[in-house]
Amino acid sequence: MRRELEQAFLRRRAGRYEALLVIERESGARERTTVVLGSDDPRAASRALGRQVARAGLADDTSGVRLRVERGGDLVDDIALAELLTAAFEEERRRGGDAS
């Protein structure tokens, strides 16, 4: 069954980034999961998140992800970070990091 990473919310917590993921299944059901990332840089965190999603088999596709970053208490869409996430996801899949 296909799983698509629909949304990712990045926020800083305890000096590093944490991501809340919204994954949509082919049936339309949504699941939410949280991933703690070991970086305090949003670009590095986005790349790490893409790799981790691929390695863990959390999603089959990230190409349409809406990535939002918490900045000053607001959630801001960040297309550049979404593109970094997707590029890292695709690279990891090509390298065989898909565990599903």
Image (spheres, grey):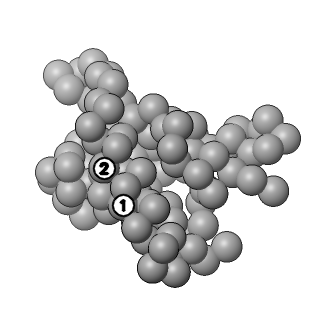
Q: Is residue 54 above or below residue 99?
A: above
Which residue sits furthest bottom? 96
Q: Nearer the viewer, residue 57 or 33?
A: 57
Q: x, y percentage for residue 72?
A: 17, 22
**Amino acid type at image mark 2:** Leu
Residue occupying image coordinates x 81% and y 56%: 1
Q: x, y percentage for residue 80?
A: 26, 37
Residue 63 as seen in the image, left or right of residue 91: right
Q: Which residue is mark 2?
A: 84
Which residue sits furthest right? 27
Q: Is residue 94 above or below residue 24?
A: below
Residue occupying image coordinates x 26% and y 54%: 45
Residue 32 is drawn in which quadrant? top right
Q: For label 1, count other residues whose C-alpha is less than 10 Å away and answer few (under 14), some (14-19) or many (20+).
A: many
Q: x, y percentage for residue 55?
A: 50, 72
- Which quadrant does the C terminus fall into? bottom right
Q: Which residue is mark 1?
A: 88
